[in-house]
Image (tube, rainbow, N blue to C red):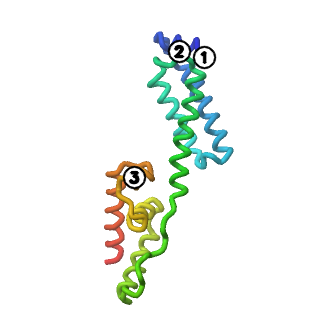
Amino acid sequence: MDSLLASAKEGNSDAFAKISGYIHEISHSYFLSKYRGKKILNKDDVDDLTANVYIAFAEQYQKIETIENWLRRVLFLTFVRFYKQNNLKRTTQLKESLTADDSFIGTDQQHDLNAILKEIDTLSEEKQEIIKLRFWGDLQFNEIAEKLNKNEAAVKKMFYRSIEEIKNKLK
């Protein structure tokens, strides 16, 4: 593989195509083994991670000294990063109960609150998680974005659209 890499660095497109194919096969096999071992739960993630490694190779191949060392390191780091991010999502604990003292809530307000909670339950899991992290978890948008591995602006947009959706359903 080192000779293919050297040829690819010299501009040989056939060598680049061949080594790229090897990178793809090895990466896919590695991530597929993680899927079979239940470390990756979705087959689409296997394809995404494989593509990430290929993209990293295409961007860095000119700087790679030893292809085997580079590939081992990139496969490991790509998987660890993915696993940590997904594990963080799975282990996020939400405070599911209201902390307000029921004695301060009137019957009409309790009815309204129950209607709102019922509507929240109809939202997608992602929308529910954003709302719960914001209200019950008392997190800022940037913290929610970090936990969910999303852009802060996207989280804000989804939050406000979800609130609007709930308001419209309750009219």
The mark lying in front, picked from 3 and 2, is: 3
State the CA–CA distance, disc 3 to disc 2. 42 Å
Q: Nearer the viewer, residue 122 or 85?
A: 85
The residue lying at 43 percent from left, 64 percent from top is 137
Q: In which quarter of the image is residue 27?
A: top right
Q: Which residue is the site of mark 3?
A: 145
Q: Which of marks 3 and 1 is nearer the N terminus?
A: 1
Three-letter code for the amino acid on which mark 2 is drawn? Asp
Q: Earlier in the sequence, mark 3 or mark 2?
A: 2
Mark number, residue 10? none
Q: Earlier in the sequence, mark 1 or mark 2?
A: 1
Three-letter code for the amino acid on which mark 1 is drawn? Met
The residue lying at 60 percent from left, 49 percent from top is 41
Q: Which residue is the site of mark 1?
A: 1
In the rendered view, does 68 fall on the left or right side of 99? Answer: right
Using the image, determine if residue 73 lies above or below residue 42.
Answer: above
The mark lying in front, picked from 1 and 2, is: 1
Using the image, determine if residue 8 lies above or below residue 139.
Answer: above
**Residue 108 spot, x, y in % from top left:** 35, 88
**Residue 67 spot, x, y in % from top left:** 57, 20
Q: In which quarter of the image is residue 171?
A: bottom left
Mark number, residue 14? 2
State the CA–CA distance, disc 3 to disc 1. 40 Å
